[in-house]
Image: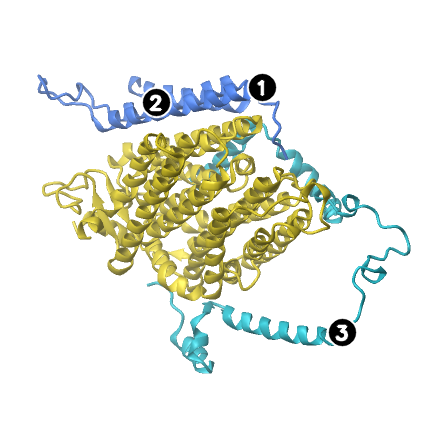
Amino acid sequence: MNFLLTHAPILIIALPLLGAFLTPLISRLHPKMRNIFVLTILIFTGFLTMLLTRDVLANGIRVYVLGAAPSTLTVPTGSIMPVRIILETDALSVLMAMISVSLAFVSALYSSKFMENRTGLDKYYTLLLLLLAGMLGMELTGDLFNLFVFLEITSISGCALVAFYTDRGESAEAAFKYMLIGTVGALFVLFAVALLYGEYDALNIGYLASKIQYSFLDKIALVLLVGAFAMKAGSVPMHMWKPDAYGEAPASVVIMLVTSSLASLYALLRVCFTLYGNVLNTAVVGWIIIVLGVLSIFVGVTMALVQNKFSRLIGYTAVAEIGYMLLGVGVGLASLTNGSIEDYGLKAVQGGLFHIMNDALDLGLLFLVAGAVFYSTGKSDLNKLGGLAHNMKYTTIFFMIGLAAVSGLPPMNGFASKLIIYETSYQLEPLGPILSIIAILSSILMLAVFVKVFHSAFLGPKLKEYENVKDAPRSMLIAMGILAVFIIIFGLFPDTVINTIIKPAANALIDYQGYIDKIMGGV
Amino acid sequence: MFGKLSNMDFHVISQQKPFWLLSLGTLETTAGYWNAVVFVIAFVVIALVVYIIRAFGEKTYKKGSEQTKPFLSGNPEPEKEKVHVRADNLFWGFTEALKDYYTPAVRGHTGIVNDYVYWFVIVLAGLFIIIGVGT
Amino acid sequence: MIQHFPFIAVVILIGLGIYACMFKRNLIKIVIGVSLIESGVNLFLITLGYVKGGVAPIYTNAPGTNMVLPTPQALTLTSIVIGLATTALMLSFAVLIYKHYSSIDAKTRRLKG
């Protein structure tokens, strides 16, 4: 157990990677063996993540140096700077890792029935595990170039999965668009990493954070990093790939894509709060993030109202939900001065991080319901659906839970995190109430959007062509049920969740000095 | 260094609660608090009252006769496909009233991949002007 | 002045790449634009490691002078391999689009609004 714990950071990344490369071999035996193998790998990764989470929440940041004899030897004797690739896991990293692994497990469970009649499934599961490995690498690493490499792994696997339905031209088009904008963004990230390397001769985030000054080249690197990661997270006005990609990918892939956008959002937070923590002009950058967030909320929700395809509509609301997270975190960043944060700023960061977790669950459930409808009826055009609640009872109930959660209706978890974001953004000094008003009104519009979907697809008289649709198969219902149960539990007991996981994560995010000290070891 | 809730507020709130169990689900935001368990209990109580009031309604009716069919001022009922309002027609009033916003917005989402890169470069240029040159 | 030539080349390459991505309608030309941006960034990485009068960072039979920094060369190798993978994937998507739409013009798209 101690061995597992010491090497947990690298094992969490290596296990899905190994599983990804073994999956084509094992799928030659029997399809069921491949499904069981994938689920086993995911269960082991989840177990390791929970072990790491328990240790990090009890003992603080855990550091892992790849290739050093005691695996915490960051700065060897006789050296003034850290060498080797270092994985640094603080409370925020393990929060994101828990979200990624849980959603990957739900996705694998769902796809065992959803993708049953397709060919090429060995490549599908390989790419799914690679996507998970890439996301976990992005979330656990403490090294900028490592972040770039895992960002590209995530991007490539995600795009290949978007184009999975190769019999439709629209999937290839969506995948091309996603790949193009993802690659251009990642190349700009590499350019910024090269700039920082050229200035300070280091790639380690902790070391760079201690040495960084706010010179002109550093500002260029900040602009490139913030722009590229905000684009990968899907904020307006660079959001247009999101409805395309989320609308055309298979439903079980989309929840992994949602989680990969959240991993890019995590990288944005890491850059703004930790890498530039010492020198950032928090008022300017904080307000930029707030403006991006509010624009995303408004444009995302209003464009969702006029869509007619199920998954594309939920893709636009995913853009809006990223806006809420950016708003919460931006309010926290804007109220941060000289390392001490206002009362409402800390609560806003907690609200933003809680919303990351809630949004992954809510949107995951909605996309899985869209997939179940597509599986049963073969259609995803809202103009042609209707009256499905007569036959698909459980799916309707799950959709109602997802509707209440994502539009912020009590007592679901969406309401708890959105309430924190409304109340804290109201208290920001200039123009705070306007942000809060836009957020609340957009929340009401989001309820309108999902009531539109609910009426078109589920309510109404029983139509002739849908006489014989059956409800979704049991494994798909179990996958949706897991998410629904978590939504209800997080909604009924939000303070337990916040005190256990979110408060340490917010404190770890704001405390960049602790991040640096763990690397430099008191040198 | 980090902001905290002042201890006095928390003390006052917890003194006012009759059962410690109810402080289990209470979330304190900086401007108030929210408890989902109390909400659910209140919802159940109100639903019970609604059900009791509904039980005083008319119980005797004949199923399947004229009493349960929809009444459309004596007109014949159209077939089900035509009755269901489709997604294109929902919220038409809202979309039509905000035509000045929606027409440029929907046209701006062209779907051409060059525009995606164009918006990205515009945002980078804007950020550079604000962060790099401005402050 | 001559020591600035690689950086000027980097700016020109990245500028041409972004121009190709923003204004060219043919999908293959857009992929070539991405390849140009990638070449520019790789050139930038290599140039950062230059030490004046340095030789290749190989220890066997090394002359005693300074060596150029080896880390950017390792980063560039990784980046070239990633660029290969992304270019191959984008080109295969372009082939799929041609199979279904019979044209590789960026204006013939069906996902809009």
Could you say which disc has been placed on residue B57 in the image? 3
Of residues C18 and A117, the one nearer the viewer is A117
Q: CA distance from mark 3 to mark 1?
A: 66 Å
Query: What's the chain of the residue with tag 3?
Result: B
Task: List x then y, in percent, for residue A420.
Answer: 49, 61
Q: Amino acid at mark 3?
A: Gly
Of the two numbered discs 1 and 2 in the rendering, the one whose residue sits closer to the viewer: 1
Numbered disc 3: secondary structure:
loop
Label whose residue precedes the other's in the sequence (1 or 2): 2
Which chain can be seen in blue? Answer: C
Of residues A150 and A364, the one nearer the viewer is A364
Q: Amino acid at mark 2?
A: Phe
Please say whether residue A82 is visible from this viewpoint: yes
Tag 2 residue = C7
- Apparent side of residue A291 relative to residue A303 in the rendered image (left or right): left
Which chain can be seen in cyan? Answer: B
For label 2, count other residues whose C-alpha is less than 10 Å away and answer few (under 14), some (14-19) or many (20+): some
User: Does residue A21 lie above or below A474 as drawn?
Assistant: above
User: Does residue C94 lie above or below A403 as drawn?
Assistant: above
Who's the residue at 62% across and 32% down the image?
C112
Numbered disc 1: secondary structure:
loop
Task: List x then y, in percent, for residue B40.
Answer: 54, 70
Q: Colour of chain A?
A: yellow
Could you say which disc has been placed on residue C105 in the image? 1
Q: CA distance from mark 3 to mark 2?
A: 84 Å
